[in-house]
Image (cartoon, helix red, strand yellow):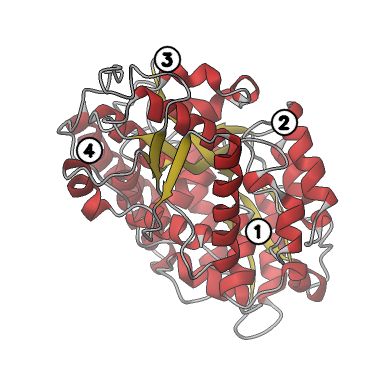
């Protein structure tokens, strides 16, 4: 569920009105309600979004069990779960907020956090954030997603970075070593040619180029090469660079000279998932949760896939999701919500990290999907539990874990979805026109992105 809808909505983009609703971004909820002046153990009710839908019965049952256990520990707190699906819908966001229907804790993607803060659509939780005991161990680059200056407006639930997903079975068939996946783009090219040579219908390497997903992957591959999407001040495009040119030249080489990418292009998220699930696609850029989506929704098998770090990368595009607070939430609701978030999403061995329960319920365990803590004590404990209760071959993903240890997370650029839409044009041109002029494509894209950034200044 998460992987599929996360990728689709990332690709589609989410935009919010910049007109403030509720309170200004810098406002802190004041204790003016009857709850605000009550004792700390006074009854408080909070509504929480993104309860798993009934179509995911095991995950929903786990959620409900966690709510019951949490309320037993905190008898003064009542949680009202909301299971609207998908968890966030751009077209209804404003109406829900204005109509008082937005949850006290609402679900967000990283890409939209700063827009929500700028529009005054989330509460400043800085005065209460120190109650979260695991905060001191959280990766600063992850926590920074929900910060604006020295103020904090939410907490992460998941975090991922991109790597290289590959079909181990096809590697073996093509005479490649699945335990030694490509470490450079040159090695990717060579492996892709061998896989494509297996016969009709086999594709060595797949790439997006439509629905904003092409620009998304361009960004990931550019970051991996050490490039930047925008200038440090966020006012100018920076991808018309040697690194940006290398991304497109690499794809052009594989598509037209090596013939290792297949003839069908203008691919979106589901297209590559379907190709990977069919057993005919050798490699693609993606996070480890791609393997879960391929297994759960596209008839793949965990045993057939592996993930390694992005070739030659010192930086990797990071993404994920989390929760923010309604600007109308009272201090007591914020404090209760922080307690719930820590219980459900941030504590090793419980909530989303209760891998023993997940294994007993028949859910996949062992994918390195979420990295909130790095090598700190909570992070180490989470990895130990993930390995202890693994139901998938952990060693297939160890190259990703080992490589990612030396990779720094880099967030998406400002106006990400608008920029991705522009770069879709460059990606699709290179993959559909053998005579595509890379210098001209990057120059045209640079001008368009500069205009986008100028309007947001």
Question: Is the C-beta separation of discs 2 and 1 under 8 Å?
Answer: no
Q: Residues within 10 Å of mark 2 (few under 14, many from 20)?
A: some
Tell me the element at label 4.
Answer: helix
Q: Earlier in the sequence, mark 2 or mark 1?
A: 1
**In front: label 2 or label 4:** 2
Tell me the element at label 1.
Answer: strand
Q: Earlier in the sequence, mark 2 or mark 3?
A: 3
The residues tagged by marks 4 and 1 sit, at their Cα atoms, a distance apart of 32 Å
**In front: label 2 or label 1:** 2
The image shows residue 402 at horizontal and vertical percentages of 78, 41
The disc label shown at residue 127, or none: 3
Q: Which residue is mark 4?
A: 452
The disc label shown at residue 86, or none: none
* Vertical comparison of 114 with 71: above or below: above
**345 to the left or right of 383:** left
Q: Residues within 10 Å of mark 4 (few under 14, many from 20)?
A: some
Q: Quadrant of the C terminus?
A: top left
The residues tagged by marks 3 and 4 sit, at their Cα atoms, a distance apart of 35 Å
The image shows residue 280 at horizontal and vertical percentages of 64, 77
Q: Residue furthest bottom?
A: 200
**In front: label 2 or label 3:** 3
- In terms of depth relative to the viewer, which is nearer, 29 or 118? 29
For the point 40% across and 51% down, which residue is it? 215
Q: Which residue is mark 2?
A: 378
The image shows residue 338 at horizontal and vertical percentages of 49, 30
Q: Residues within 10 Å of mark 1 (few under 14, many from 20)?
A: many
Q: Earlier in the sequence, mark 4 or mark 1?
A: 1
Tell me the element at label 2.
Answer: helix
* Vertical comparison of 281 with 118: above or below: below
For the point 30% across and 20% down, which residue is it? 29
Q: Is residue 262 visible?
A: yes
């Amino acid at each position: 569920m998460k992987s599929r809808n996360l990728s689709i909505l990332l690709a589609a983009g989410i935009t919010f009105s910049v007109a403030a609703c509720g309170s200004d971004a810098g406002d802190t909820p004041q204790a003016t309600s009857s709850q605000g002046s009550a004792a700390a153990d006074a009854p408080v009710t909070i509504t929480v979004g993104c309860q798993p839908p009934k179509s995911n019965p095991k995950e929903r049952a786990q959620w409900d069990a966690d709510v019951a256990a949490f309320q037993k520990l905190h008898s003064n707190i009542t949680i009202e779960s909301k299971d609207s699906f998908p968890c966030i819908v751009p077209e209804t966001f404003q109406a829900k907020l204005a109509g008082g229907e937005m949850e006290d804790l609402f679900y967000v993607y990283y890409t939209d956090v700063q827009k929500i803060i700028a529009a005054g659509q989330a509460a400043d939780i800085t005065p209460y954030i120190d109650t979260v005991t695991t905060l001191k161990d959280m990766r600063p680059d992850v926590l920074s997603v929900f910060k604006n200056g020295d103020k904090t407006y939410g907490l992460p639930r998941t975090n991922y970075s991109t790597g290289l997903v590959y079909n181990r079975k096809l590697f073996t068939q093509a005479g490649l070593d699945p335990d030694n996946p490509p470490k450079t783009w040159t090695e990717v090219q060579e492996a892709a040619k061998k896989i494509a040579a297996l016969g009709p219908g086999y594709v060595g390497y797949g790439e997006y180029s439509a629905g904003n997903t092409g620009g998304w992957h361009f960004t990931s591959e550019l970051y991996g090469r050490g490039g930047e999407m925008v200038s440090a001040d966020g006012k100018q495009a920076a991808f018309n660079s040697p690194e940006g040119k290398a991304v497109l030249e690499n794809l052009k080489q594989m598509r037209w000279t090596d013939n290792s990418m297949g003839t069908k292009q203008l691919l979106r998220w589901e297209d590559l998932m379907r190709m990977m699930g069919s057993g005919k696609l050798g490699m693609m850029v993606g996070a480890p949760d791609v393997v879960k989506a391929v297994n759960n929704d596209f008839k793949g098998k965990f045993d057939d896939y592996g993930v390694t770090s992005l070739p030659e990368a010192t930086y990797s595009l990071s993404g994920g999701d989390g929760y923010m607070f309604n600007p109308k939430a009272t201090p007591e609701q914020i404090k209760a919500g922080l307690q719930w978030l820590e219980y459900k999403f941030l504590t090793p061995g419980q909530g989303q990290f209760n891998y023993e329960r997940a294994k007993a319920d028949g859910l996949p365990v062992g994918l390195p999907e979420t990295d909130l803590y790095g090598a700190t004590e909570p992070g180490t404990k989470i990895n130990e539990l993930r390995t202890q209760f693994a139901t998938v071959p952990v060693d297939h993903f160890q190259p990703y874990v080992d490589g990612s240890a030396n990779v720094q997370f880099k967030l998406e650029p400002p106006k990400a979805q608008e920029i991705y839409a522009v770069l879709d044009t460059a990606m699709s041109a290179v993959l559909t026109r053998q005579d595509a002029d890379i210098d001209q494509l990057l120059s045209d894209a640079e001008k368009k992105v500069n205009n986008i950034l100028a309007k947001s200044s």
